[in-house]
Image: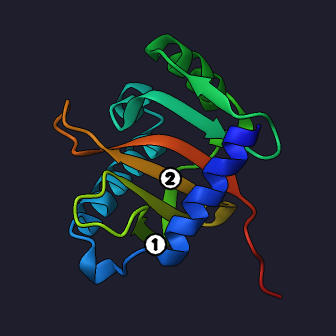
């Protein structure tokens, strides 16, 4: 638990003190990778989704204990369950906002975070759900994808009245 709290403080510190979009050279590549991942989510393509993840994946959903997946089999089991649940009852995802920042303020950083707010849409284009999450990326040299997701942390969606 202490390690996880350290991680959160570390990442948020990176968000506060990080460079702006114009100085982070891989900003556009992260956005392309993220949008590619979301296309696979919309298709409910579990194999396609898996290509966007690192070998070890941490998912922190709600107030539950983080889930660490260390194999394709674990990934498949979890996302097949998701695919068959009401949470996957949408047709497409609209990206409402996304902010990408490196974790460290150095030119060759290998970690960054994408803070994304999105809406899930039905067949008529109506919003059936909203979400916000931090997508943590690591620079990856073992794949055609230069950046891979290693952790997703759900956040509360702020509503404006």
Residue 86 versus residue 104 in the image, above or below: above
Pointer 1: residues within 10 angstroms few (<14), some, or many (20+)?
Answer: some
Q: Which residue is mark 2?
A: 135
Front-most of 25 and 51? 25
Q: Furthest-left residue in view? A: 144
Front-most of 130 and 99? 99
Under tag 1, what secondary structure? Answer: strand
What's the mark number on residue 99?
Answer: 1
In screen coordinates, is 80 left or right of 2?
left
Residue at 55% from the left image edge and 22% from the top image edge: 69
The quadrant where residue 27 appears: bottom left
Residue 144 versus residue 24 in the image, above or below: above
Under tag 2, what secondary structure? Answer: strand
Question: Percent position (x, y) of residue 100?
Answer: 41, 68
In screen coordinates, is 95 left or right of 48?
right
Question: Percent position (x, y) of residue 133?
Answer: 60, 57
Dot placed on the residue nearer the N-terminal end, 2 or 1: 1
Is residue 31 in sight in this rendering?
A: yes
Pointer 2: residues within 10 angstroms few (<14), some, or many (20+)?
Answer: many
Residue at 33% from the left image edge and 79% from the top image edge: 21
């Amino acid at each position: 638990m202490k390690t996880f709290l350290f991680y959160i403080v570390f990442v948020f510190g990176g968000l506060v003190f990080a460079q702006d979009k114009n100085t982070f050279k891989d900003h556009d590549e992260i956005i392309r990778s993220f949008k590619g991942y979301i296309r696979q989510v919309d298709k409910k393509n579990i194999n396609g989704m898996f290509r966007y993840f690192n070998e070890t994946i941490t998912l922190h959903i709600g107030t539950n204990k983080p889930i660490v997946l260390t194999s394709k089999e674990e990934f498949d089991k979890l996302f097949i369950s998701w695919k068959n649940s009401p949470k996957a009852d949408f047709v497409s995802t609209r990206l409402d906002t996304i902010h990408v920042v490196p974790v460290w303020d150095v030119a060759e950083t290998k970690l960054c975070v994408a803070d994304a707010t999105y809406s899930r849409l039905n067949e008529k284009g109506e919003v059936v759900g909203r979400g916000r999450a931090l997508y943590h990326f690591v620079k990856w040299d073992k794949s055609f994808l230069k950046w891979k997701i290693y952790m997703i942390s759900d956040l509360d969606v702020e509503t404006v009245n």
